[in-house]
Image (cartoon, coloured by chain):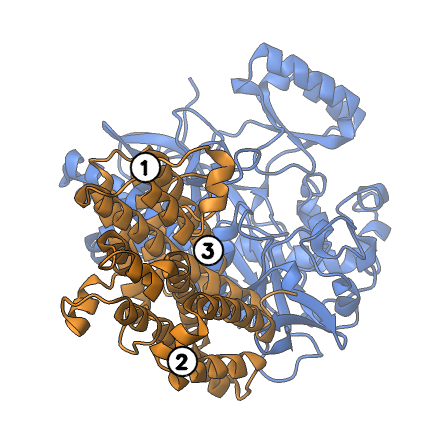
Chain colours: A blue, B orange
Amino acid sequence: MQSFFDEMNGVGDEVRMPYAHFDEWFKGEDLASLRAKQREAEEVFRLMGITFNVYGRNEAEERLIPFDIIPRIIAAREWQKLSRGIEQRVRAINAFLHDIYHRQEIIRAGRIPKEMIAQNDAFLPQMIGVTPPGGIYTHIVGTDLVRTGADEFYVLEDNARTPSGVSYMLENRETMLQMFPELFSQNKVRAVSGYPRALQRSLAACAPPGCSGPPRVAVLTPGIHNSAYYEHSFLADKMGVELVEGHDLRVVDGRIAMRTTQGYQPIDVLYRRVDDDFLDPLNFNPESALGVPGIMDVYRAGGITIANAPGTGIADDKAIYSYIPEIVEFYTGEKAILKNVPTWRCSDPDSLGYVLENLADLVVKEVHGSGGYGMLIGPTATKKDIRAFEKKLRARPGNYIAQPTLSLSTVPIFTRDGLAPRHVDLRPFVLVSPDKIDITPGGLTRVALQKGSLVVNSSQGGGTKDTWVLED
Amino acid sequence: MLGKTANGLFWMFRLLERSENTARMIETGQRIALTRAEASDDEWASILQAAAVSQGYHAKFDEVTRDKAIDWMLRDKDNPSSVRSVIGTARNNARMVRTALTNEVWEAVNSCYIRLNEVLARKVSERDLPKALEIIRQRSAFVRGATHGTMMRNDCYDFARLGTFIERADNTARILDVKYYVLLPSALSVGSSLDNVQWETILRSVSAHGGYRMTHGHKVSPRAIAEFLVLDPRMPRSLFFCTGKLRDNLGYLASDYGMKQPSHMMVDELCRRFMSHDIDAIFDYGLHEYIQDVIGTLGGLSRQIEIDYRFYE
């Protein structure tokens, strides 16, 4: 039996420091009243309509993401190191994106093979030579981290396209403040509620040269049937900006303008929650009804800021991921503070051989996949699953990467019988503007609610927790 | 404000008003069936008509029965104006315009939707019907209360109110349109007095039972009922009252935006019409023709508002 690091109890039975006050509080509570609180929390989420739509099912189906009332607690010192590491990584990624769409020094220097870029679907030729306003490519990043020990953190993914989940971070905290105010009196927890204002500020700071007067920001959503629609409307609402869809927008006098009750009015910064491919039917997927015809031309002419910039997917591509330590070193001149998970690129014949021999111990992911779909978790897969996956792997090795199964840390969740450890990950949210990088203390903790499960994705039965970063 | 948002608010409130009107029609039908010996299933046919859901009903069912009529108006998914369909669509509109609503209004709409989905999940038995209708009424009142108590009096509110009063005026006009023959002097000459079932249907279906008595006592005359529903400025569902509200809210928009639109002229014209004649003139003109005119004008006004404020492309 593999042993896991538990963030509350360490490896033994001694409660770790950040959880000391919480532990005391919990011992004074009775399970029945906490069970009632857990139900109360679900009711709050249901009434507020904090739901997501499930893909591939009945269009009308909305589900709640299960919320667990036990907070995940991170010490000030731990957070300091994490946030330094994240900031370094995000800086490097922005520098990498600028380079890769301009001089491609990193390829010339032989640090990344040319074909990793040229033959990558996530590389957007339309962005070659384009510098976004303020030089920022990834305005919003959600860095996925996992923990394996007291001092061991790994970056799992860099989510530099359109990371989601920040609304859960905010609503989880609101819910906890409502339900357990005394916990926040006993523990000094750093606030997260400034995020919407910081996001608005950060986006406005990247306004394009064509902007005169206070920048007008809008959020672009694919519409109410999108799985993350709740978050889109939540962010627009909290920032006090319009929530637009493609059909609200058109090009007017070289600007992107939205149709208002008083005519078309220009937008300066568009926080888009629509994928690159659907952004502009004239420049990308011609079938797209979600985007704005001609927006790329306006963008290239400096008429609008698109956040995140088109083409940022090349930086969080799973094949590029394995090069991030080199990328960090190349652009910052420093060693990467946060570790990468060792990764075998199956395009490489030696690696492929190793992966095929060790499938039962590895996690194999599609290079362009997300949401926990299309992956193999060797240790929990059946022999039949493994054999089926082996075929796919042999057929298109370049489509896959493999990683060892990490011993993800656990955090207690509340069950019928009290606390029980479950595996978690962490997605802190990062805002990048020309003058600063802003990381909200905490982030979204996703938790695999099934005992022993390592899959935390909400689309696959994962839940969420409030995440606390303690003041010093 | 986005044109799409104005559209969403307009329809959200229009549909909420509709769900309440439909519930009231069902209540009326049920009440009459239970208290009037002479009532028959024919009464349900005219209620379906007054609720403007008759066509769809007849496409699906051969005969009109109480059970089928109630289920059609309350829960049938094939009926876009059933209470359940309307609340689902209203809530989708609310999700679309979430940024224009206060938390209170959104939560009231969302909990209305959740609660009614529970209540209307299965066929409602005769015994449970009063309770179900009460819940519908109560939940709409929550939304209305949250709207009045928390929304800014800006363009969001104006579009919400325009939707409410277009729907309400249309509802009153439709009831008059279906039942106008009851109010005609010639109908009276057939029997000795106005058919009690008929006038009660009319007054109850616009919640005007008490209001009418307050105004006219127990003396029921077709002329007085028609006047009450068309011209009374204090009766919140009369055509004149609703039109006055439409004019007010379009007026606020005009002063907010600093611009008058064609819809403003239309509503002014409609108001003038109500003020310039009494009920005798309407009977002289022909009650039926008059109501048909009003329905047509309201439809035109609604379309003009859509154009003036760029609801669509």
In the rendered image, which residue does mark 3 sit on? Answer: B95
Q: Residue B94 at what x, y percent from top left?
A: 44, 57
Looking at this rendering, what residue extends furthest in the top direction?
A: A383
Question: Reading the chain from its start, which is encountered first: label 1 or label 2?
Answer: 1
Q: Is residue B123 left or right of residue A31?
A: right
**Host chain of mark 2:** B
In the rendered image, which residue does mark 1 sit on? Answer: B66
| Residue B209 in view (yes/no) | yes
Q: Is residue B53 left or right of residue A184?
A: right
In the rendered image, which residue does mark 2 sit on? Answer: B274
**Host chain of mark 1:** B
Question: Reading the chain from its start, which is encountered first: label 1 or label 3?
Answer: 1
Residue in the foreground of this view, choosing between A248 and A147: A248
Circle nearer the viewer, 3 or 2: 2
Judging from the image, what secondary structure is the residue with disc 3 in? helix
Circle nearer the viewer, 1 or 3: 1
Say above or below: A106 vs A389.
Answer: below
What's under tag 1, amino acid-wise? Arg
Q: Residue A253 at what x, y percent from top left?
A: 76, 77
Figure quadrant of the C terminus of chain A: bottom left
Dot 1, how many residues are within 10 Å of its Cα: few (below 14), some (14-19), or many (20+)? Answer: some
Residue in the foreground of this view, choosing between B125 and A312: B125
What's under tag 3, amino acid-wise? Arg
